[in-house]
Amino acid sequence: MCNIKNRRAFTMIEVVFVIVILGILAAVALPRLAATREDAFVAKAQAKVDAIRSGLQNYRSKSLLKGNGAVYPASLDSGGKLFSVVTNGVTPGSNAGQWQVSGSTYTYSTGGHSIVFDYNASSGTFTCNRSSTSPSSLCDKFE
């Protein structure tokens, strides 16, 4: 006969206790993971903005070497690709991690926020527009 005292198993209280602890850990971890995803999209935008600014300076340098003076491109886009004049270009879209364009205003979506940039062809600047970006503190990451 099987003796009940020799059986080894978890009690219901122990199982409930473990489930509660896992629930608490999940509640703490999920908001941090969501913030991490948005931070990754911001970092991606920072890399692209740095590449655009570097490409603008390269364009200006090439223009000077050709004897055309310090000229910046009138548009950053060509052939349906954004920024293709100064970088390898990206396809526009409205999802998180993608760019949209309207004239010389570029909008980058992080999923939760939109970061707006203005391109000035006469000065060659590509700057974050604080009045159109919400929250405006996101622009601090692009200075």
Image (cartoon, rainbow, N blue to C red):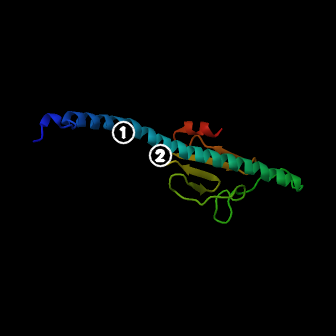
Residue 1 picture location, percent across and down = 9, 42
Query: What residue is disc 1 on?
Result: 26
Disc nearer the start of the sequence (2/1):
1
Residue type, mark 1 in image = Ala
Give me the disc on residue 35: none
Relative height, residue 115 to residue 75 (above, below)? above
Relative height, residue 89 to residue 108 (above, below)? below
The residue drawn where x is 55% and y is 54% is: 98
Give me the disc on residue 112: 2
Residue type, mark 2 in image = Gly
Relative height, residue 79 to residue 143 (above, below)? below
Measure the alpha-carbon separation of dots 2 and 1.
21 Å
Quadrant in which residue 42 is drawn: top right
Q: Which residue appears farthest toward the left when viewing the image?
A: 1
Q: Secondary structure at mark 2?
A: loop
Q: Which residue appears farthest toward the bottom when viewing the image?
A: 79
Q: Secondary structure at mark 1?
A: helix
Res 132 visible: no
Dot in front, 2 or 1: 1
The residue drawn where x is 77% and y is 52% is: 72
Residue 52 picture location, percent across and down = 69, 50
Label 1 neighbour load within 10 Å: few <14, some 14-19, many 20+: few
Q: Which residue appears farthest toward the front when viewing the image?
A: 1
Residue in front for this viewpoint, 59 or 121 = 59
Res 6 visible: yes
Q: Is residue 64 left or right of residue 72?
A: right
The residue drawn where x is 51% and y is 52% is: 96
Label 2 neighbour load within 10 Å: few <14, some 14-19, many 20+: few
Q: Which quadrant of the figure contains the C terminus? A: top right
Quadrant in which residue 82 is drawn: bottom right
Residue in front for this viewpoint, 136 or 10 = 10
Question: What count of labels does the image hold?
Answer: 2
